[in-house]
Image (cartoon, grey):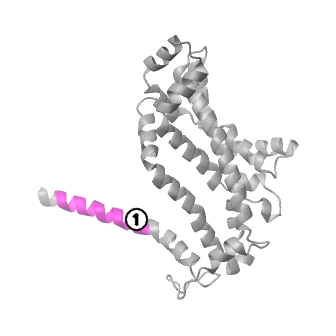
Amino acid sequence: MKAKKIWGTTWRHLLLIALSVFWLIPIFWLVLTAFSEKKGIDTAHFIPEKFSLDNFVQLFFRPDTAANFPAWFKNSLVIGIGCCIISSLFVLMVSYAFSCMRFKGRKALMSFSIILGMFPGVLSMIAIYFVLKMFGLTNSTLGLIIVYSGASGLGFLICKGFFDTIPASLRESAKLEGASELTTFVKIVIPLSKPMIVYTVINSFLAPWMDFVMARLMITSKDPKEWTVAIGLFNLLQKTLASSYFGVFCAGGCIVAIPISILFVIMQKFYVEGITGGSVKG
């Protein structure tokens, strides 16, 4: 039995190692290609023959009509930060309303919101596009911020579960002292919800930062300065550009991953606490 248990554990670990290797190979190759001296796709060598930083230099200091990474990065950063602030406020306020307040139709509205959130967002993309087009917001960062933030409140479920774990006696004590709902929310609930705030902020930033489909639909301009990072990097994979810009594409992929990786490393503790805390109650 002992030998069988050891063999089972060894087999599982070997399988996990194999899966990890297969998962890491494309990322490792992307990083190596970013530091390669060649600009195109080098199918003859997995490890480049010569290394260079020219792809990163071109990415930041030699923008042209095909690769204008500084403008793409600025647009994506503005959209990401704007959505992060608005979406986080929406999620926290909706979660507090459903968790800590009692009003007529609360359960029915919560059930309807959960069901509505199950429908994929792509079903409404065309309708959203024509609505924004009527207001002249299709080729603007403001339009994308509105799109990404509009339905963010539907993602309240995990945050509500976390708020449910906060003792009701704290809110009741505050109300006995004359505190309003806003005061209770800002001075009692929010300070106790740091893990959930971190979880909400990270998710609110990642959605617009990595999205391509909605950004591609809303940004129809041919001017590269108005594109986001996702649109710009995808454009570099065209047949006419891949032979000269694939190394730049890989360098851009590395740069885009750095802020997200740093954010997760720094806030990993709070992120995990937010997920586990929000799963205690539903």
Measuring 74% from the left and 68% from the top, which residue is drawn there?
68
Residue placed most toward the observer, 170 or 238: 170
Q: Is residue 21 magenta?
A: yes
Q: Residue furthest bottom?
A: 49
Q: Is residue 144 left or right of residue 6?
A: right
Q: Is residue 213 left or right of residue 273?
A: right
State whether residue 51 is above or below residue 111. below
Write down the residue under mark 1. 20
State whether residue 252 is above or below residue 80. below
Q: Quadrant of the N terminus?
A: bottom left
Q: Please, what is the three-letter code of the amino acid marked with disc 1?
A: Ser
State whether residue 132 is above or below residue 165. below
Measuring 56% from the left and 78% from the top, which residue is drawn there?
35
Residue 164 point in image, percent of width and height: 46, 26
Q: Is residue 231 visible?
A: no
The residue range painted magenta reads 5-22
Residue 139 point in image, percent of width and height: 81, 52
Residue 32 point in image, percent of width and height: 52, 77
- Main secondary structure found in the magenta portion: helix
Secondary structure at badge 1 equals helix
State whether residue 74 is above or below residue 133. below
Q: Badge 1, how many Cα within 10 Å: few under 14, some, many 20+? A: few
Measuring 60% from the left and 29% from the top, which residue is drawn there?
93
* Picture quadrant where residue 109 is located: top right
Q: Is residue 7 magenta?
A: yes
Residue 44 point in image, percent of width and height: 54, 87
Measuring 87% from the left and 42% from the top, which residue is drawn there?
134
Q: Is residue 174 visible?
A: yes
> How many marks can you see?
1
